[in-house]
Every structure is written in structure tokens, then in C-alpha cells.
Amino acid sequence: MEDLAALVATILVLLGGVALINILLAALSRRKKLKPWIAMVFNALTGFAAIFGISISWALGIVPLMGLIVGSIILTWPNRKRR
């Protein structure tokens, strides 16, 4: 049983890392430090990770799902109008 708990904890940490990297890439893309398509592709991969996590358990899938939502908002928010 301890091995199963360690596996689930590892998966949770990895999915959390994917979510954090997604948010970081979206922020870098927003500040024009990174090409937008790189952040969009990683955002799609985060979506697949969220689907994988949700297929196992909602508790595992909620972390990348939140990263996906935040990353999508950052990527699609309109730019400020410059005067």
C-alpha cells in the first residue's frame, strides 16, 4: 500500500509541476519573452495531463486543470491599448 501511495504522490507532484510550468510559459509569452505558439502547445499538453489526471481521480486532475484555466486566461487576455 505504501508503494501505491508513493506512486500517487509522485503523479500529483508531476502534474503540479506541469501546471506551474504552463503558467510560467504563459506569463513569459505574455511579456513577449517567448513565442506564443510554444506556450499554446504546452497549454494543450497541460490539458491532456488534466484529462489523464481526471481519468484517475478528480483529486489528481484538479491541479493541472487549474493550471490550464489560469494559463488559458493569461494567453487569451487582450493586450492593453497603448496611447
Image (spheres, rainbow, N blue to C red):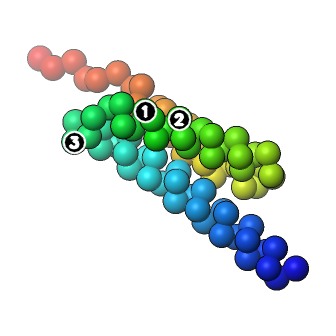
Q: Residues within 10 Å of mark 3 (few under 14, many from 20)?
A: few
Residue at which label 2 appears: 44
Q: Are marks 1 and 3 in contact (CB under 8 Å)?
A: no
> Mark 1 highlights which residue?
40
Query: What amino acid is at disc 2?
Result: Ala
CA gap between label 1 and label 3 equals 14 Å
Q: Amino acid at mark 3?
A: Lys
Task: Examine the image and state in which quarter residue 48 appears.
Answer: top right
Q: Residue 77 lies in what quarter of the image?
A: top left
Q: Is residue 15 visible?
A: yes
Residue sitting nearer the eye, 80 or 35 = 35
Residue 79 falls in image quadrant? top left
Calculate the distance from the C-alpha at mark 2 to the C-alpha at mark 1. Answer: 6 Å
Image coordinates of residue 34 in percent, x first then y, are 26, 40
Label 3 and label 2: CA atoms lie apart by 20 Å
Q: Residue at x 73, y 76 (%)?
A: 6
Give the crowd class for mark 2: few <14, some 14-19, many >=20 residues within 10 Å: some
Is 67 left, or right, of 79 in this rendering? right
Cβ–Cβ below 8 Å for labels 2 and 1? yes
Q: Which mark is residue 63?
A: none
Q: Which residue is mark 3?
A: 33
Element type at mark 1: helix
17 vs 29: above or below: below
Label 1 crowd (10 A; few <14 / some 14-19 / many >=20): some
Q: Say which element carries label 2.
A: helix
